[in-house]
Amino acid sequence: MRYLMALLSAAGLIWIAEAGPAAARDYRYCLQSRAMGIPGDCSFRTRAACMAAASGRMATCAVNPRVAFGRHHRRGRAHSGQ
């Protein structure tokens, strides 16, 4: 019985250690205000959802700079090998 408890405890500790923090996601639109700064809260997939969250909060929505300028650039041309 002690062996089983030790095994389950070790498995639980390994599982917790490997879990790590939740993955942050950068969606296309960011809610921005003076309090939040730039880029702000980038958890909105659509502009309509962002604008609904901004309503009445003295906030605005903008395209996420990480999405707009970061990930979509190619690093050179593809070569055909011929």
Image: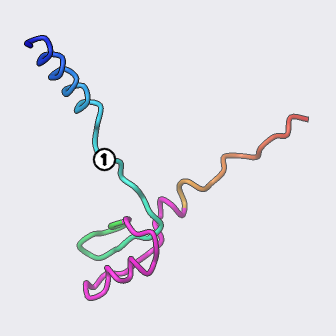
Position of 17 relative to 22 (above/below): above
Mark 1, Cα crowd under 10 Å, few <14 / some 14-19 / many 20+, is few
Instruction: Find out whether residue 47 is within the magenta segment.
Output: yes
The quadrant of the rendering that contains the N terminus is: top left
Position of 9 relative to 2 (above/below): below
- For disc 1, the marked residue is 22
The residue at the point 17 percent across, 22 percent down is 8
Which is nearer the eye, 14 or 2?
A: 2
The residue at the point 54 percent across, 64 percent down is 68
Identity, as a three-letter code, of the amino acid under mark 1? Ala
The residue at the point 20 percent across, 28 percent down is 12
Q: Which residues are magenta?
A: 42-68
Horizontal relation, residue 24 to residue 29: left or right: left
Q: Secondary structure at mark 1?
A: loop
Q: Position of residue 42 (x, y in %)?
A: 38, 65
Residue that extends furthest to the left in the rendered view of this protein = 2
Which is nearer the eye, 58 or 27?
A: 27
Residue that extends furthest to the bottom in the rendered view of this protein = 56
The quadrant of the rendering that contains the C terminus is: top right
